[in-house]
Amino acid sequence: MKQRFGLLVLSIVLLAGCAQYESERGVTVNWDPAALSGFEKGVSTRADVMAALGPPSQLVSLGGETVLYYLNESASGRGLILVVYNRFEIDANYDRAVFIFDADDRLTDFSGWIEPREES
């Protein structure tokens, strides 16, 4: 009986573990939230936006309009894996910006959210 209990405890210890999780998808967003304030509807061009922000995640053509879509999704976390109990904590960030241009490549509308980065 004592040997079985010891084997059970050893099994639980060997099957338990820690885990770390990190994932990043989309384009790298290396610009700050203030970058969005530098664009002006009717004045800024598609070339201006791409020069400031780099290539987009997606370029969509909608009839006479063009849409540049920037997306970056990152997540990181850690967890504890046990036989009867698992726990994970994941912190996810979603940065995105959308720019709409007319047939002359002039900015007609834009919106976005860039998560402020903590200084390392």
Image (cartoon, grey):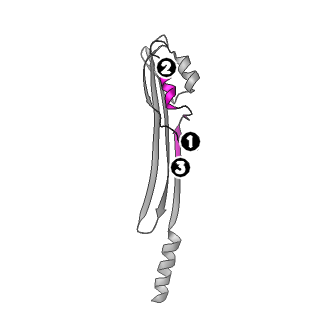
Which residue bears the numbered disc 3?
22
Q: Report the residue marked by disc 1.
A: 119
Give neighbour class at mark 3: few <14, some 14-19, many 20+ (Cα, 10 Å): few
Mark sitting earlier along the chain (2/3): 3
Residue type of the residue flagged with mark 2: Phe
**Residue 59 makes an appearance in the image:** no
Instruction: Point out the stretch of residues depicted in magenta.
Output: 23-38
The numbered dot on residue 39 is 2
CA neighbours of label 2 inside 10 A, class few (<14), some (14 to 19), many (20+): some
Residue drawn at 47 percent across, 79 percent down: 8
Q: Earlier in the sequence, mark 2 or mark 1?
A: 2
The residue drawn where x is 51% and y is 78% is 10
Identify which amino acid the numbered label 1 is placed on: Glu
Q: Is residue 25 magenta?
A: yes
Sequence-wise, which precedes: disc 1 or disc 3? 3
Residue type marked 3: Glu
Let me know if residue 64 appears in the view.
yes
